[in-house]
Image: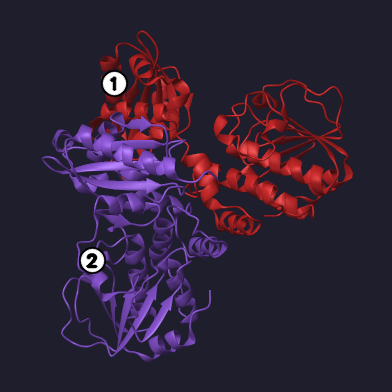
Chain colours: A red, B purple
């Protein structure tokens, strides 16, 4: 992975930095930002402000330096603004981000053309892998805490080295990060083995009500399930993926109650059906393999209706 | 990872091979054996017989060549017998395995001293990683199917690159295997996203009955749950690990009904309690972090009894 020379030069030249990540920050955004900030501050003697617009999720509070994020715009204008893990100011939740020079480091496809220097590699596994290479290009050392942040970034954005974006260079980066002192089990425990009992019980109820209909699987969470288990909407993360992991399921649907007769619909496709089209038909949207919208009605009705919609889409797709 | 010269020479000299793996074969045993057999046959023109004593689990039937395993001892004596992923003949389920020269390639600690040449690296992530290095030492190429078998071996034995046995060299091997044509998502789909709806429903029922008591979590599966969901004991794989992944749980207990008032007890510790000692007290055994035994009584009684035993062990451990 080649890091652009002008990006490296711009960073080496600057004294003060503002690093900003997107709303609803994930492991990749947080890990990348914390790693880059640490290297700039500790090893290169620069001034760095970390900025984001949301509380740091509990699960990532093991990352060294997570408390360093501020949530309000700085008063002064830094030499360099770095937009990390997103390419659009709108995604940060702020307006008019200050910076004499504006840089973007991101692995997402974006339409906007923000930034004086934009480094975007849409097939990189993660922004973490890009920052790993950037740190090398800056000639800075990789200490254990920096490595932990980058490893977490790569692990979370590749789904634990599972997604197709995982490349040989992702694995080689992981090897180096282990050599810098990262313990894979420690990261696993923090990320994947820290589920609350309440969430586990909710998962149990949801799976217990699983409705399988050929290539469609529907799981649902209702207000009464939240009540019985002492959980809330944030405990349903990844429930749609759970249904997708069933053998023979082509489209997984997750229904989450948001009102007396109202459900948020999340759909996951294994690739052969475009769920964005189904989502649009219910006034929602998304991508080919992950989309969602809203539906009104009783749970039973909504389950049936959405199953029919997905079945129709499955039926109308061309044979391979 | 240095492959012993005498092992490489012995393999290069031989014309016929018998490769044997352990009972209840896992991804590491199967993937390693299939990879080594393929290379010896396809690229080195040798005669190879693959032998094991159990049906090949459904989940591994995507591995190229899985049908090639025979389940009965061959009539002739091969030049070389290779015991793979185990160091003891007893673990294979056979007696008197034939072979003019007997080799062992294994990453488990074993007490027995079987074999003319024994290559054991107990801190290797997997036998797959050892075979990966062996294939290089033999000077054989790594085709796509061989790479798929080795990748599956490494992924399954490291719990998806999560266990502490995952090393920089495991990641570098994974990088090379991707370059040989492996798709990480394809392996993920086959291994981790092929859960039956029945097993998913059983998991739901088990999680729904989760009993949390401080640092102890107990989940149970009863005969009536099997009946309601159309499942059997083999659908409970990893249920103990599920309970372990709860935040704050130090010891996870999984109870599986095996008779009217009889339960198989599986315990998983996060490291601070030696569950083998608890297992021994109920006439069972195991390791520090994974052990089990049997208990008699009604489900409620057994749940209470085992919780008390674990609580006592937690209480008596020395403060850190």
Give coordinates of residue B94: x percent, y percent. Answer: 19, 74
Residue under label 2: B67
**Residue B223 percent across, percent down from the top left:** 15, 38
Chain at tag 1: A
In the rendered view, would you say B80 is above or below B35? below
Q: Which mark is residue A166?
A: none
Residue found 46% across the figure and 62% down from its top: B181
The C terminus of chain A - image quarter? top left
Q: Does B87 sit left or right of A66 as displayed?
A: left
Quote the CA–CA distance across marks 1 and 2. 41 Å
Is residue A215 among what the camera can see? no
Comparing B181 with A37, the one in front is: A37
Between B309 and A144, the residue placed more toward the observer is: B309
Chain of the residue where label 2 is placed in the rendered structure: B
Q: Is residue B296 visible?
A: yes
Q: Secondary structure at mark 1?
A: helix
Considering the image in quadrants, where does the N terminus of chain A appear?
bottom right
* Residue at which label 1 appears: A303
Where is residue A276? Give x, y as percent: 44, 28
């Amino acid at each position: 992975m080649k890091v652009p020379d002008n990006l490296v030069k711009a960073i080496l030249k600057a004294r003060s930095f503002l690093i900003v990540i997107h709303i609803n920050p994930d492991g990749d955004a947080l890990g990348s930002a914390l790693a880059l900030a640490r290297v700039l501050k500790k090893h290169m003697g620069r001034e760095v402000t970390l900025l984001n617009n949301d509380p740091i999720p509990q699960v990532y509070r093991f990352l060294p330096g997570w408390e360093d994020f501020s949530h309000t715009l700085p008063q002064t204008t830094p030499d360099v603004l770095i937009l990390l893990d997103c390419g659009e100011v709108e995604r940060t939740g702020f307006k008019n981000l200050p910076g004499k020079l504006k840089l973007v480091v991101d692995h997402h496809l974006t339409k906007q053309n923000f930034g004086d220097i934009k480094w975007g590699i849409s097939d990189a596994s993660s922004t973490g892998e890009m920052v790993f290479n950037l740190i090398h290009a800056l000639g800075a050392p990789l200490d254990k805490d920096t490595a932990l942040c980058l490893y977490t970034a790569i692990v979370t954005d590749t789904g634990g080295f599972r997604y197709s974006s995982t490349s040989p260079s992702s694995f080689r980066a992981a090897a180096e990060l282990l050599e810098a002192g990262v313990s894979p089990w420690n990261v696993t425990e923090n990320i994947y083995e820290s589920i609350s009992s309440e969430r586990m019980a909710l998962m149990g109820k949801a799976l217990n009500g699983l409705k399988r209909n050929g290539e469609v699987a529907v799981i649902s969470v209702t207000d009464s399930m939240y009540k019985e288990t002492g959980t809330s909407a944030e405990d349903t993360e990844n429930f749609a993926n759970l249904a997708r992991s069933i053998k023979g399921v082509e489209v997984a649907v997750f229904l989450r109650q948001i009102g007396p007769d109202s459900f948020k619909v999340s759909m996951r496709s294994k690739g052969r059906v475009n769920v964005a089209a189904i989502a649009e038909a219910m006034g929602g949207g998304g991508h080919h393999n992950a989309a969602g919208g809203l539906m009104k009605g009783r749970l039973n009705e909504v389950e049936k209706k959405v199953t029919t919609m997905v079945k129709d889409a499955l039926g109308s797709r061309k044979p391979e």
